[in-house]
Image (spheres, grey):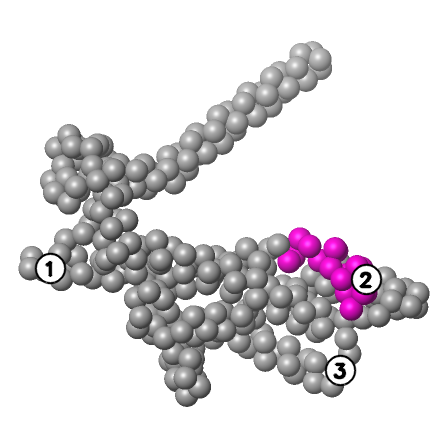
C-alpha cells in the first residue's frame, strides 16, 4: 500500500511538472510574439509607399500590392543629399566615443572612491549619489547655458562632453570594487614594488572587466538614446544624431497637407 501511494505521488508530481513546463512555453511564445510584432510591422512598412502605409489593400500588418522597398531606400539615400547616413554616423560617433569616455571616467572615479583614502571622500561620493536623483532632462538648460558661455554650442563637443559624466557608472564601479577587489591584493602588489598605475592596469583592471563591460553598454545605450540635449544645443542639421533628425522629418510630415510627406 505504501509503495502504491508513493508511486501515485510521484506520478502526480511529474504531471504537475509537465503542466508547469507547458505553461512556461506558452508564456515564452506569447512574449516572443509580443516583441516580434513591432519588428514585423517595421519590415512590412518599409516596403510600402506613403499611400500604402495609410490606405494599403491588405492592412498595416501585411505587404501591399506594390513592393517599394528599393525605391524607399533610394529616396532615403538621396533625400537632402543623403543626410540620413550622416545622422547615423553622428549617432555612432556620439554613442561610441561618449560611451567609451564615460566608462573611463566611471572606472577611474569608482576605483578611486573605493581604494584610496582622502579627505572629503564620503562627501564627494554623496554628491555623486545626489546626482543620481536629478533627471537628466533637468540639466539640459544649465548645460546649454554653460556651453553657450564657452562658445561650444552647435559643436560635437556640446554633446560629447556632458555624456562623459555618468554618476550611475561611478556608483556601480565603486560597489563592484569594494565587493570583488580585495584590498589585500592591492597591498601585496604595492609591497612587491608595483606602482599605482601598474597595480591598476595589471591587477585591478582584469578583475573589473565584468563591471566595465556593463558600464560601457549602459553608457553607449544612454548616449545613443540621448535626444533632448542634442536638440537644444545643436542647430546644424549635419551634426544631428538620428534621434533628432528623424524627429525633424516626422514634424515636417505632420505639418499639414501643404507640407512634404516623407513617411516612406
The answer to which image quadrant residue 211 occupies is bottom right
- Note whether 261 is above or below 18 in the view shown: below
For residue 182, which numbered disc appears in the image?
Answer: 2
The answer to which image quadrant residue 207 occupies is bottom right
Residue 86 spot, x, y in % from top left: 35, 57
Residue 261 spot, x, y in % from top left: 14, 53
The answer to which image quadrant residue 58 occupies is top left
Question: Which of pointers 3 and 1 indicates the residue nearer the eye?
Answer: 1
For residue 118, which numbered disc appears in the image?
Answer: 3
Q: Residues within 10 Å of mark 2 (few under 14, many from 20)?
A: few
Question: Which of pointers 1 and 2 indicates the residue nearer the eye?
Answer: 1
Q: Nearer the viewer, residue 13 or 60?
A: 60
Q: Nearer the viewer, residue 149 or 227?
A: 149
Give the Cα distance between marks 3 and 1.
61 Å
Nearer the N terminus, badge 1 or badge 2? 2
- Give the extent of the magenta segment: 197-212
Which residue is drawn at the image coordinates 48% and 70% (left, top)?
Answer: 160
Residue at the right extreme, as displayed:
192
Q: Secondary structure at mark 3?
A: loop
Q: Secondary structure at mark 1?
A: loop
Give the Cα distance between marks 1 and 2.
63 Å
Residue 170 spot, x, y in % from top left: 62, 68
Which residue is drawn at the image coordinates 74% and 86% (left, top)?
Answer: 119
In the picture, measured across the screen, residue 110 lies left or right of residue 32, that is right
In the picture, measured across the screen, residue 38 lies left or right of residue 90, that is left
For residue 259, which numbered disc appears in the image?
Answer: 1
Residue 225: say if magenta: no
Q: Secondary structure at mark 2?
A: loop
Amino acid at each position: 500500500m505504501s509503495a502504491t501511494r508513493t508511486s501515485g505521488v510521484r506520478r502526480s508530481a511529474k504531471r504537475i511538472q509537465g503542466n508547469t513546463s507547458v505553461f512556461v512555453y506558452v508564456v515564452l511564445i506569447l512574449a516572443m510574439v509580443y516583441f516580434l510584432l513591432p519588428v514585423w510591422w517595421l519590415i512590412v512598412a518599409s516596403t510600402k509607399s506613403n499611400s500604402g502605409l495609410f490606405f494599403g489593400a491588405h492592412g498595416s500588418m501585411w505587404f501591399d500590392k506594390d513592393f517599394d522597398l528599393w525605391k524607399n531606400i533610394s529616396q532615403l539615400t538621396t533625400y537632402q543629399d543623403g543626410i540620413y547616413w550622416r545622422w547615423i554616423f553622428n549617432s555612432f560617433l556620439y554613442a561610441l566615443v561618449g560611451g567609451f569616455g564615460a566608462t573611463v571616467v566611471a572606472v577611474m572615479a569608482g576605483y578611486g572612491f573605493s581604494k584610496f583614502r582622502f579627505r572629503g571622500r564620503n562627501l564627494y561620493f554623496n554628491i555623486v549619489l545626489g546626482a543620481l536623483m536629478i533627471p537628466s532632462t533637468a540639466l539640459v538648460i544649465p548645460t546649454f547655458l554653460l556651453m553657450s558661455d564657452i562658445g561650444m554650442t552647435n559643436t560635437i563637443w556640446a554633446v560629447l562632453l556632458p555624456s562623459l559624466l555618468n554618476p550611475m557608472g561611478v556608483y556601480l564601479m565603486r560597489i563592484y570594487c569594494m565587493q570583488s577587489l580585495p584590498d589585500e591584493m592591492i597591498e601585496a602588489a604595492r609591497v612587491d614594488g608595483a606602482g599605482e598605475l601598474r597595480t591598476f592596469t595589471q591587477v585591478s583592471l582584469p578583475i573589473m572587466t565584468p563591471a566595465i563591460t556593463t558600464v560601457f553598454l549602459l553608457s553607449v545605450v544612454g548616449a545613443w538614446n540621448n535626444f533632448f540635449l542634442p536638440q537644444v544645443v545643436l542647430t546644424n542639421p549635419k551634426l544631428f544624431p538620428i534621434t533628432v533628425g528623424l524627429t525633424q522629418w516626422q514634424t515636417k510630415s505632420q505639418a499639414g497637407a501643404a507640407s512634404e510627406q516623407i513617411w516612406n
